[in-house]
Amino acid sequence: MLILGIETSCDETSAAVVRDGCDVLSSVIHSQAKLHEKTGGVVPEVAAREHVAYIIPVVRKALDDAKISLSSLDAIAVTKEPGLLPSLLIGLQTAKTISFATKVPVVETHHTVSHIYSNWLERDASEIMFPLIVLTVSGGHNDLVLMESHSRMRVIGTTLDDAAGEAFDKVARLLGLGYPGGPRISHAAKSGKRDAYDFPRAWLFDSVRNGNKRKMSFDFSFSGMKTSIRNFIAGRKLAEAEIADIAASFEEAVCDVLSRKLCEAAQSFGAREAHLAGGVSANGRLRELVSERLKPEITLRYPVKLEYCTDNGAMVASAAYFSRNNSFFCQGI
Ligand code: KG4
Ligand code: ZN
């Protein structure tokens, strides 16, 4: 089954052709990061205008690279939600217009589910074992999902405030490191000390949901950590070495919380695999801590390429293929 995936939910204009959910025949991503660096974050209308300028060339290149004509496609998958509305509309209208002209059906996908399927790209699907736990962590979302099959997914934890990627972006801005914050913080952290500052970790012991005061909740909260850093640096002129130490200590604190909750969830739900997905899954320290802490019998996976961690059309096509019969999946025209 050949699916064209289109992704425009935030600041990447992307299209890809994927065969049977795993085999990536082409993947084209136009990142708008340079454009948004000027404003230190994504301005929705600016992002939408950039999608308008790039969506047709990106789709055309994806088809050309895959050596596929529109008429040989089985479906066009496109991100429906969640995301920035003006950005989403460009992808949706493009998919529906191509569908109107070619009669190829449109399949609308959920963005978080698409990130989950980034771990199927360029892998043999028969090797991935259920049940598994996925930590999807990016600028807009931060969820722990228990996946028992392609049609049984349950969110067992989510963020109560900021997603980790959003915290990376905000702290990078406070430190004057620019956008996007994740890679900038990681770069600055290389020359800093991880234990220079002990920024607060929100473990959130959940007495209500678990009926047991001592049980850690699988929900997340990063706004307190961000505020603590804001208060810490307020009114101070930071030397380069201090910025590096703050970046390293902040990265450590975020990755400590993410990795502990993922590993604990994997163990308590009897998962055979633990997956990292979303923009923050590109983070080297997060990958390192999870592989140190995960029980050896649980398989750790993260996307095979860095470009599949952040937003991309290939994961959208894969999600459409594997979840074509489930309720997360919204059928289009
Ligand atoms: O998945 P994505 O492209 O978009 C959303 O769905 O939000 O993720 C973007 C987020 C940004 O917040 C960015 O700072 C973060 O992923 N990110 C990283 C890294 N690379 C990207 N965070 C930590 N470390 C990284 N290496
Ligand atoms: Zn995303």
Image: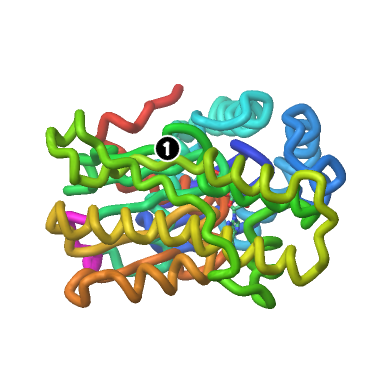
Q: Nearer the viewer, residue 204 or 85?
A: 204
- Across and down, in percent, residue 250 comes to 58, 58
Q: What residue range appears in magenta? A: 126-132
Q: In the picture, which quadrant includes the C terminus? A: top left
| Residue 126 visible in the displayed image | yes
Quarter of the image holding residue 331?
top left
Q: Which residue is mark 1?
A: 159
- Across and down, in percent, residue 138 comes to 52, 48
- Across and down, in percent, residue 27 comes to 58, 59
The number of numbered badges drawn on the structure is 1
Quarter of the image holding residue 91?
top right
Residue beneath the point at 26% across and 54% down: 133
Q: Is residue 274 left or right of residue 267?
A: right
Q: Nearer the viewer, residue 255 or 114?
A: 255
Give the vertical position of 283 relative to 80 (above or below).
below
Residue beneath the point at 76% across and 32% down: 43
Q: Nearer the viewer, residue 72 or 256?
A: 256
